[in-house]
Image (cartoon, rainbow, N blue to C red):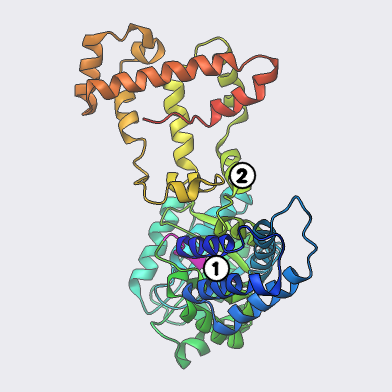
Amino acid sequence: MFENLSDRLDRSFKLLKGQGRITEINIAETLKEIRRALLDADVNYKIAKSFTDKVKEIALGQNVISSVKPGQMMVKIIHDELATLMGGDTVDINIKANPAVLLIAGLQGSGKTTFSGKLAGLLKSKRSKNPLLVACDVYRPAAIEQLKVLGEQLSIPVYTEEENKNPVKIAKNAIRHARKEGFDAVIIDTAGRLAIDEQMMNEISSIKKEVNPHETLFVVDSMTGQDAVNTAKEFNDRLDFEGVVLTKLDGDTRGGAALSIRAVVNKPIKFMSAGEKMDALDVFHPDRMADRILGMGDVVSLVEKAQEQINEEEARRLQQKIAKNQFNFDDFLSQIQQIKKMGNIKDLASMIPGMGKALRNMDMDDDAFKGIEAIIRSMTMEERSNPVIMNGSRRKRIADGSGTSVQEVNQLIKQFDETRKLMKMMTGKKGKNMARMMGNMPGMGR
């Protein structure tokens, strides 16, 4: 995500290397490169020019203190202006009403139905809501079936009237059903088209008028770049929606939609989605996204993801086992499962400052732990709890059972033993918090 833009911006900052202060002369080439980087990312020309003009105005007005280099000052200015361009503040959705009615709009293929499922899952798991999904795409039978499948995965009911071809009536009936059955959030998935047409716009406008939703969210495929921004403007002119959702940020996106859409429609980006997993949905934080674009990582989001998976009682139990040098392969396997629940391994690692660029060309997918898990699962219960008994013949059996080599088994056992010793050393008074952290987020690799 934004890899090319990040590289181009990084190169532009280097143009100021060796300069003692920022002047109109030495900043000119840097601003030109930044503008080119934004245009290459499919940002609207007027927005790109306005952005660099603003950066120039701020930069030339700065008194650079001796301890801060011009390049560093420029990074700070660009960071703040990128965050401002994307909205500045984080804006939450309105779910205070009971039931809160959320209308989902967008073109066909933008990811509306998948987002509807993800949003329902987020409201259920993180906001303690009892959501109801509503299938109002009466033109594409697959959309109704897809919503049913997602609802089943999430254990969330889906309201359908498959014989009814009137989406306005379906939506109104669903809201009545929600009130009667005690659902406190209603998520209405609507129909889309391959392109904007009058019939679609009239239909979505009628649904909004009749159900009076508390929140209308416009879903855009971020891979479509500037086209997504243009589409958002047309929808906003008709619907006056409350927020934008960026989907498919894990694809080959240049970032133009994320950087331009707020300036064009003057509506906040509220969510971003990357990946097909139902938990791959995040609240959009402009300042954190600016951090990631500039290669600064996103430690806050990483910690939040970790906290969602950490069981406090399990953490205390694990700390006690580490202190007694009883941490075993069963404990390690449990920690792997927690890490996997946090999301894509490469995305998680890229949230650590400086790691994004280092990992860019590395093949790190959801199967990164597959070999380690296979080795551990090939061990007997006794071997997992007491690794010291694993002699040569046992290691050969484990390698054969896991489809790996004896060398790989040896390497894992050696790394595990070294990590366990390190954990034990760090359980003194000064190391308790670190030991607890390591117990919940093991960093051992193969």
> Taking 375 as reference, is 213 left or right?
right
Looking at the image, which residue is at 60% across and 58% down?
17
Vertical position of residue 85 compared to residue 10: above or below = below
Q: Is residue 266 visible?
A: no
Instruction: Please give the range of residues in magenta.
Output: 244-250
Looking at the image, which residue is at 42% across and 78% down?
164
The residue that label 2 is drawn on is 304
| Amino acid type indicated by mark 2 | Glu
| Amino acid type indicated by mark 1 | Val
Q: What is the x, y in percent for residue 138? A: 40, 78
Q: What is the x, y in percent for residue 169? A: 52, 79
Query: 35 or 335, which lies in front?
Result: 35
**Image quadrant containing the C terminus:** top left
Query: 82 or 369, which lies in front?
Result: 82
Quarter of the view holding residue 177: bottom right
Vertical position of residue 123 compared to residue 169: above or below = above
The residue that label 1 is drawn on is 245
SS category of the residue bearing label 1: strand
Q: Is residue 50 visible?
A: yes
Mark 2 neighbour density, 10 Å: few (under 14) some (14–19) many (20 or more): few
Q: Mark 2 touching mark 1, by CB under 8 A? A: no
Mark 1 neighbour density, 10 Å: few (under 14) some (14–19) many (20 or more): many
The answer to if 118 sits in the magenta stretch is no
Q: What is the x, y in percent for residue 394? A: 24, 12
Query: 274 or 380, which lies in front?
Result: 274
> Taking 28 as reference, is 66 left or right?
right
The answer to if 249 sits in the magenta stretch is yes
Looking at the image, which residue is at 63% across and 69% down?
86
SS category of the residue bearing label 2: helix
Alpha-carbon span between mark 2 and mark 1 = 20 Å
Looking at the image, which residue is at 31% across and 10% down?
390
Query: 112 or 350, which lies in front?
Result: 350
